[in-house]
Image (spheres, rainbow, N blue to C red):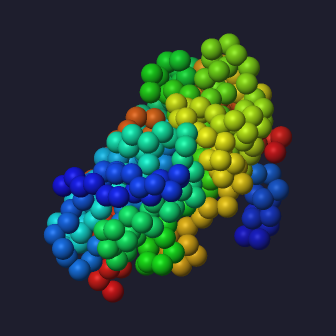
């Protein structure tokens, strides 16, 4: 179920990262790209629920760790969205996937050479704004005044710890400039199609089998076409 | 029909629409049933009363309010009073919608 894969690192070397996979050498193989930061934790259970449904329906799927994320030992502060995109493209080639399914901010990393689905896409600026706001709210609660504007200005240069995530200056600039988006021909699945409460809004992590059934069903239908 | 649409666009969402939208957002954030959020009154405690409503969850809550009601909430608008109770959050949001 767990494998390792050779992952390109920002300094040009190759590291080793973990991947969760259901791999039985079947013809249809999906690369899963989870959301980043806080939502990575919120969606971990749900992403594996969806993967189990693909496996049960004859589709291989793989969820590779990216450097600085999940079980990776690479420092998060050294990573960038551009670097994660390179790593994602390398993972797609290594695992010989045929299709891509990304969730939320995972859409920024999608390779544009494979047929793909993006669930509930979000813009880099929205994600950055949420994390800046969480930090200034927490600071205010502790009796310290920090404005999002000042935090952003210094974070763009020196990096910043936001909501517990140690983000480098390059990553903050990428989020602020917001140039990353899913490929134009990716099929978008909005929450309205899936139904139920959006899991990324939940204060406590949760999963939802009915939503996993619907999402997997939409993609399995697309794979069968 | 046309006249109704025009007037809705001019005045923005009504007070009861704001109330319903806020309850729906809290239902989603807190993972509650509709019946539970329908039972919220002005005194129902939020931030500081619900351990799961931490700063990241409050940030998500405010961003969702902005998106669904098409308003902007500045950092300096956010204080303990508006987040203390459902009534405080509703009054704040209504004022923002009128302002916007």
The structure residue drawn at horizontal position 68% and vertical position 56%, both measured from the top left corner, is A178
Could you tell me residue A108's position as x and y percent? 55, 61
The structure residue drawn at horizontal position 54% and vertical position 47%, both measured from the top left corner, is A79
Could you tell me residue A145's position as x and y percent? 74, 20
Q: Which of A202/A89 is in front?
A: A89
- Image quadrant in which the N terminus of chain A is located: bottom left
The structure residue drawn at horizontal position 34% and vertical position 51%, both measured from the top left corner, is A16
- Image quadrant in which the C terminus of chain A is located: bottom left
**Residue at the bottom extreme?**
A225
Could you tell me residue B41's position as x and y percent? 54, 26
The structure residue drawn at horizontal position 71% and vertical position 27%, both measured from the top left corner, is B78
The answer to whether residue A52 is left or right of residue A31 is left
The answer to whether residue A31 is left or right of residue A138 is left
Quadrant in which residue A19 is drawn? bottom left
Q: Image height check: is A108 above or below A126? A: below
The answer to whether residue A148 is left or right of residue A106 is right
Q: Image height check: is A147 above or below A101? A: above
């Amino acid at each position: 179920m767990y494998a390792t894969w050779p992952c390109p690192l920002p300094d040009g070397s190759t590291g080793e990262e973990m991947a969760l996979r259901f791999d039985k050498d079947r013809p249809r193989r999906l690369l899963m790209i989870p959301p980043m930061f806080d939502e990575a934790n919120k969606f971990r259970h749900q992403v594996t629920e969806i993967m189990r449904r693909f496996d049960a329906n004859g589709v291989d799927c793989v969820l590779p760790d990216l450097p600085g994320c999940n079980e990776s030992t690479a420092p998060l502060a050294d990573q960038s969205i551009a670097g994660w995109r390179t790593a994602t493209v390398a993972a797609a080639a290594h695992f010989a996937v045929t299709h891509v399914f990304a969730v939320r901010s995972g859409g920024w990393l999608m390779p544009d050479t494979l047929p793909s689905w993006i669930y509930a896409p979000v813009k880099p600026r929205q994600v950055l704004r949420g994390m800046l706001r969480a930090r200034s709210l927490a600071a205010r609660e502790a009796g310290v005044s920090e404005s999002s504007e000042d935090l952003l200005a210094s974070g763009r240069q020196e990096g910043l710890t936001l909501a517990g995530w140690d983000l480098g200056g390059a990553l903050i600039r990428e989020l602020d400039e917001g140039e990353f988006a899913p490929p134009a021909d990716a099929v978008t699945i909005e929450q309205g199609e899936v139904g139920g409460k959006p899991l990324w809004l939940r204060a406590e992590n949760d999963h939802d089998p009915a939503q996993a059934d619907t999402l997997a069903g939409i993609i399995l239908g697309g794979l069968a076409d | 029909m046309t006249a109704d649409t025009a007037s809705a666009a001019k005045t923005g969402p009504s007070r009861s629409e704001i109330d319903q939208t806020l309850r729906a957002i809290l239902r989603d954030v807190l993972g509650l049933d509709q019946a539970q959020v329908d039972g919220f009154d002005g005194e129902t405690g939020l931030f500081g009363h619900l351990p799961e409503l931490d700063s990241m969850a409050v940030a998500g809550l405010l961003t969702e309010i902005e998106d669904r009601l098409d308003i902007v909430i500045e950092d300096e608008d956010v204080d303990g009073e508006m987040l203390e109770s459902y009534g405080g959050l509703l009054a704040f949001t209504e004022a923002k919608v009128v302002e916007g």
